[in-house]
Amino acid sequence: MAADMTVEGSIPLYGFGGKRGEIPCTRHLVVADQGFFPSLVCYPDGELVSVLRGGDGHVGPRGRLDVVRSLDGGVTWSPPVTVADSDADDRNPALGIAPDGSLVLLYGECRSYDAAGGYYRDNSKWRVVCMRSQDRGRTWTAPQPLPDLPGLLTVSPYGGGEITTCADGRMLAAVGVADPADAGAFVGAAMAVSTDCGRSWAFPHPVLGNATEEVDFTELADGRLLAVARCPGVGSHDLWSLHSSDGGATWTPPAQITCDALHPGHVLRLPGEVLLLTFGCRRYPFGVRAVTSRDGGETWDWSHQLVLVDNCRGDYRTADCGYPSTVLLPDGHLFTIYYRTASEEPYFEGTAERWIAAGVRYRLDDLQEALAR
């Protein structure tokens, strides 16, 4: 089991003008001793399953994907079990539960490395593959490549993201695409759609545009789709929202949510049609934060900003952190998984660091009470 790093305390709540209060935090926990870009799902009985990147750093040719699970709401976690370790850099998992209960995993295989293991940008040396599991990630089918779009290459899923299952059974995933006619230049994200529980995938709609990347899809109560995307082609490295009323065929112009270095984001629908947006804080003091929306993501409540994790304990020495994913457990707890450095030494570019996957547990009732203040 991964080590328990229980920290008694609370989650600060900030608004305009400073601190507004706090909510109790059950505990902070280590999920895995190494792990980037964790993607997390919760089964109806409360079992948590996460797939995350191990084997190498943020970028490196030895990357693999591991699965970990928790049977007690995220308090303890199983040791990592490798599920993908090809001759490529296996990375950027996106995980989802299909309508038939199978677990579906999309990830990227990257071969854009030279003989010395140095990365060079060539999106033509990437591909996206899919694996399925009928036993909650204990055994898997062989990886199957996703099709390319007409005139474009599929590059990678949204690292740290999830596959969204809609009310009508469709599964949606964001996949980065590139232009082979322009040296494999990245051109944005497209929505991959499966109507057969992840067995096959298609790209029925155009690219979202505006160089969208690291996109998270959410189906709203009224049937619209919300996309929260990192849009470097629009602003800087911040989050923007787009809405679709026709299943993803067309999207509204992007509307800015966060300022620079607050990304990427994950959206969870809570009871009462409240949306919880968790996102990485990739500027000092680093960590993970959250805000909510009560109007389907049209506006966000910055008067109640939760600082789920920050550098107050000295755990972070780099902006390479975050990529959160949040689930609601049957017992009423929320669990947010993310990654961060484990080093307590000052961080300097080029030094060896160890990154871990970690999590924070807190109660939905406490969150709702804080939002009502």
Image: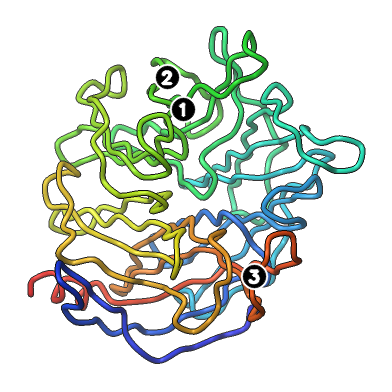
* Mark 2 surroundings within 10 Å by alpha-carbon count, few (fewer than 14), some (14 through 19), many (20 or more): many
Answer with mark 2 or mark 1, whichever residue precedes in sequence.
1
Asked if labels 2 and 3 touch by Cβ distance under 8 angstroms, the answer is: no
Residue 20 location (% of width, % of height): 16, 78
Residue 156 location (% of width, % of height): 59, 33
Is residue 63 rendered to the left or right of residue 360? right
Q: Nearer the viewer, mark 1 or mark 3?
A: 3
- Residue underneath mark 2: 207
Asked if labels 1 and 2 touch by Cβ distance under 8 angstroms, the answer is: yes
Q: From this viewpoint, is residue 195 visible?
A: no
State the SS at label 2: loop
- From mark 3 to mark 2, how far is it between C-alphas? 38 Å
Q: How many numbered badges does the structure rendering display?
A: 3
- From mark 1 to mark 3, how far is it between C-alphas? 32 Å
Query: Please, what is the three-letter code of the amino acid marked with disc 3?
Result: Tyr
State the SS at label 1: strand
Which quadrant holds the C terminus? bottom left
Residue 347: numbered disc: 3
- Residue closest to the far bottom: 8
Q: From this viewpoint, is residue 110 visible?
A: yes
Query: Please, what is the three-letter code of the amino acid marked with disc 1?
Result: Ala
* Mark 1 surroundings within 10 Å by alpha-carbon count, few (fewer than 14), some (14 through 19), many (20 or more): many
- Residue underneath mark 1: 189
Which quadrant holds the N terminus? bottom right
State the SS at label 3: loop
Query: Please, what is the three-letter code of the amino acid marked with disc 2?
Result: Val
Task: Give residue 270's quadrant in the image.
Answer: bottom left
Q: Residue at x 21, y 57 (%)?
A: 292
- From mark 2 to mark 1, how far is it between C-alphas? 6 Å
Q: Nearer the viewer, mark 3 or mark 2?
A: 3
Q: Residue at x 86, y 35 (%)?
A: 114
